[in-house]
Image (cartoon, grey):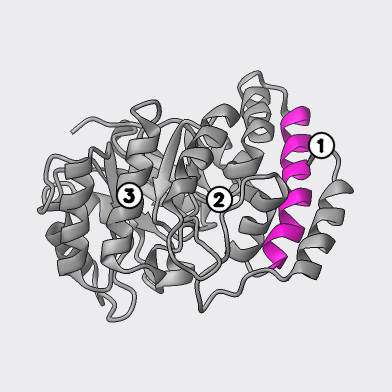
Amino acid sequence: MRFKMTGLVAATFTPMHEDGSLNLGQVETIVQHLIDGGVAGLYVCGTTGEGPSLSTEEREAVAAAYVAAARGRVPVVVQVGHTSLADAARLARHARTVGAQAMSAVAPWYFKPDSLPVLVDCLKTITSAAPDLPFYYYHMPSITGVDFDVRLLLQAAGEHLPSLVGIKYSATRIDQMQACVELDDGRYDVLFGCDEMLLSALAVGVRGAVGSTYNFLAPLYGRLVAAFQANDSDQARRLQSQAVRIIQPVVRLRGVAGLKAAMKILGVDCGPCRLPLQTVRADELERLRQELVECEGCT
């Protein structure tokens, strides 16, 4: 199966009303903002989208809303991983039904697979539910606690997971990621998931990335990629450093909560977070606004 994504893919937010219910009417605004900013795709119901905090029915509704709002202008990847493989398979079927271009899944994270063959079996259960939908394994060991060598996974999965086209690599082992990029002459698509280290990923051959800060920093990162491709290493480093300076005060505010706050400051309100995540308070929001004003190029 051939499918490849390049460029910056935004890990989208799940917009919510103040009472924590879904605010799907805001999805169209979010998608238009992202397309105007130059993103090359949307990654829905992942960590940034609070997917694990949503019910299966809510995740289906969010996925359908993003596919509808994208209207084929950019590809939509739906994250379907779940502690219940039956629900993950259901979400995979739904992603195919609503017209997503690809799906992705983290490993089960409560009862964890204790060996590589068991992980492959888990992923086979998910992908078999939508065998013609391109699949990315979502490697995020800091959250799932599942940390097998993904190069070995790609080698082992080849004959068992025919729809596997690549991985979303959200870890900092650049050497391991490079081995995945180079495996079988670039057979698999590797999407990097650590925005603060994008330049390092580009240096080892990565051509696509999925990240939460591309929701509001895509133009800056677009310039970074252009500088790298033009062999202007000094400019690329300056832009990566600028991005890090902007990201630091945002992620200090409890991760996803700070990211949603940054979107609100930009005028794209994604609403509060759902417990156990804690929404940024009004005083914290104002302090973040002042910190971002002080960052050159952030407004």
Screen quadrant of the N terminus: top left
Between the C-alphas of marks 1 and 2, the distance is: 18 Å
Q: Residue at x 72, y 23 (%)?
A: 232
Tell me which label, 1 or 2, sits earlier in the chain.
2
Mark 3 = which residue? 63
Mark 1 = which residue? 297
Determine which of the numbered discs, if any, sits on residue 212 in the image: 2
What span is in magenta? 234-253
Image vertical order of residue 266 relative to residue 290, above or below: above
Across and down, in percent, residue 84 comes to 21, 73
Image vertical order of residue 135 relative to residue 52, above or below: above
- Viewer-proximal residue among 173 and 70: 70
- Viewer-proximal residue among 202 and 273: 273
Q: What element carries label 1?
A: loop
Mark 3 packing: few (<14 Cα in 10 Å), some, or many (20+)? many
Tell me which label, 3 or 1, sits earlier in the chain.
3
Magenta span: chief secondary structure: helix
Mark 2 packing: few (<14 Cα in 10 Å), some, or many (20+)? many
Question: In the visual, does 119 lie left or right of 13?
Answer: left
Q: Which residue is drawn at 51% across and 77% down?
A: 275
Residue type marked 2: Ser
Across and down, in percent, residue 18 comes to 56, 67
- Viewer-proximal residue among 110 and 31: 31
Q: Which of marks 3 and 2 is in front?
A: 3
Across and down, in percent, residue 243 comes to 72, 44
Q: What element carries label 3?
A: helix
